[in-house]
Amino acid sequence: MRKKDKSKRVMELSSSAGPAPDTPRAWTWAIPCGLGLVVYIPSLFSGFISDDHLQIVNNPQVQSWAYLPHLLTTHLWSETKVVSDQILFYRPLFSIWMLLVNTVSGLSPCAWHLSNIVLHVAATYLVFVVCRRLLKNDIAASLTAVLFAVNPIHVDAVSWVSASNEILFVIFFLSSVLLLVPETMTYPLPESRLIWGVVLYSAALFTKETAVAILPILLALAVFNIEDKSWRWSKRTTLKISSWYLGATFLYFAARFAVLGRMGFETGRNTWQQTIYTSPSIAAFYLSKLIFPIGLSGFYLTPLISVPTMRMWLTLAGLLIGVAVLTWLAVRYNLAIGLAGALIILPVLPVLAGIRIYPQGGMTHDRYLYLPTVGLSVLVGLLICRLWSSSSSRRVALTIFSMLLAAVFSCLTVVQQKYYKDDFVFYQRALDLYPTNGLMLAYLGNLNMDKGRPEVAMEEFHKAHEADPDNPTITLFLARGLFDQHEYAEVEALLSPLLQQRNLPPFRKATVLLSLANTEIAVGKLGYAEQLLQEVEAMYPNFPEEHWAHGVLLQKEGRIKEARTEYLKEFEITGDRQARKQAYALGRLLAISSAGADAGREENPASTPFR
C-alpha cells in the first residue's frame, strides 16, 4: 500500500511540475534569467555614484594586483582618505572581486554595471534551483525566480556597483544551500558536500560580515531533513558538523579582530539605547518595503527613538506575533515555511546593529533586502504550489496574475534605475521623498560646492543645519562652506561648541579639531592652531590632511624644511599629489637658499662660524 501511495505521489508531482527532477525545461530558468538581464539594461548607461568614488575610482587598492597582500591584511577603506573608528569593514573577497573587475574593465562605469547585472542573473538562477528543490515544482520555481529577477527592491543592490557585495555573499550562501539540499534525500549527504558547504559559508563571511546571520539556517539544513522532519545524523556527527561551521565563524572573526584591532561596534554615532529602541520601527520599515516595494530610494529618513514609546511596544508585539505565526505554520504544515521566515528575519538582525554606526538619514538601504527577498520568494512559491494543484481555472488566474505582477515589477525596476544615473539625481531622489533629510541636503551642498556653485551649496548647507542641527557631519559640511567663503568667525562659532559634545566619537572629534585648526591658520592664530594639530596627531598619527595643515602652518612660520617634511608625510599617507608638488617646490626653494648661502660664505669667509 505504501509503495502504491508513493508511486501515486510521484506521478502527481510529475504531472504538476513537468519534467523529471534532474532535467528542468530550459525555459523555466532561462525566462527569469533573461528578464533579470533585460530589465537592468538602463543601468549600463549610469555612472559611478556615492561610495563608488572612494571605493573604486579613487582607490588604488582595487586597481593593481600589487595591493593583493595589502587588501588581505587591512580594512576595506584602508587605501582611501576615509579613516573612521566607527565604520571599519573586513571584506577581503569583496576587494578581490573589485580587483578582478577592474583588471578586466578598468574604470569603465558600463563594465562595472554589467558585472553587477551578471551577478544578479547568477543569483536569479540559484534562486530558481533552490526553489525548485524545495518546492518540487518547476512552474512554481520559475514564477518565483521571475518575481525575484524583476523585483524593484533590488535596484539598490544591482544599479549601485559598490553594493555588489550584497549579491556576492547571497550567491555564496545559495550555493552552500544547494549542497545541503540535494535533489534527492534518499542517501546521506557525502562529507565532501558538507565541507564545501562550510567553504562557501566562509566565502560569504569574507565577502560581508553580516553573513554570520545565515549560520543558523545552514546548520539546520546540514543536520536536519526538512522533508521528513528528521535528524540526518547521530548526536556525535551533528556536533562534528556544527563544530565545522562554528570553527569557520571563529576563524573569520579572529582574522577580523587581528586586522581591525576590534570587532566594530565598540563606538558609534548613536547610543545602544537608541539602537535598541529604534530597532522595531526599522524592522517594520524593512518588512513593509519587502512586501510593497514602492517609493524606493538609496536613502530614507528613519527617526531615532531615544525612549520607549507605546508605538514602539506595539510594533515589537506585531513583529513577535508574525514570527510566532510563521513558526506555527512551519511546525504544523511545512518546514520550508520556517526556512523562508528565517531568510526574511535573520539577515535583518545585523542590519539593525548598524543603527549604532550610521547617521540619521543614512542608516536604511534597500540593498539589505536582497537576501530576505529569497525568503519571500520561497513563501510565494509555496502559495503557487498550493494553487497550482487545484482547478485549471485557478491555474489560469494564477498565471495571468503572475504575468501582470511581473510586468508591473519590471516597469518599476526600469523607472527606479534613473535615480542611479549620477550623484545629483541619487541624492535628490532621497530628498524628494524626505524633504527634511538634512544629510541629503548636506551631500547635495557638497556636490554643488565641488562643481563651483557656492551660492546654491551654502543655501543647502544652511537648510541641512536647520533640519538637523545636532548632526556633526552636517555641521562640518556647513563649516567647510563657510571656510571657503572666508567666513572664519562663523566657522569658529560652529566648531567650538561642537567640541564640547559629550558623545562626540574620537574620529569625528579629530575631524572637528582639524577643521578648526585650518580656520585658526587662516586668521593667523598659529599658536592655537599648533595646539589643535598636536591634539589630532596624538589621537591619530596618520590622520588624513593633518600633515598638510601642519605643513601650511610651518610654512607660514618660515620653517621651510619642517614644512616640507610634513607635506611628504601627507603624500605617504594619502597619496595627495598636491602635497608632493608642494614638497618638491619647497625642496627647490631650500636648494636655492642653500646655494645662495654658500656663495655668500665664499665672498665673506669671516662670516663662517667656528667652534
Image: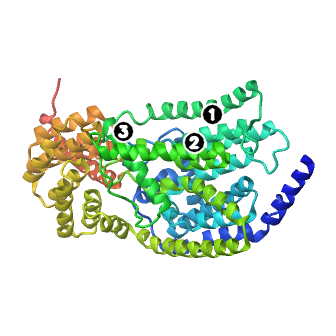
Q: Is 135 above or below relative to 206? A: below
Where residue 164 appears, as percent x and y from the top left, is 53, 56
Amino acid type shown at disc 1: Ala
Where residue 127 appears, as percent x and y from the top left, is 66, 58
- Judge the density around disc 1: few (<14), some (14-19), many (≥20) Cα neighbours within 10 Å: some
Amino acid type shown at disc 3: Ile
Q: CA distance from mark 3 to mark 1?
A: 29 Å
Q: Nearer the viewer, residue 437 or 321?
A: 321
- Judge the density around disc 2: few (<14), some (14-19), many (≥20) Cα neighbours within 10 Å: many
Residue under label 3 = 276
Q: Earlier in the sequence, mark 2 or mark 3?
A: 2
Proximity of marks 2 and 3: CB atoms separated by less than 8 Å = no
Q: Is residue 415 left or right of residue 133?
A: left
Where residue 98 appears, as percent x and y from the top left, is 55, 55
Residue under label 2 = 205
Picture residue at 44% right of the left edge, 65% below the top = 48
Q: Is residue 138 visible?
A: yes
Picture residue at 11% right of the left edge, 47% below the top = 492
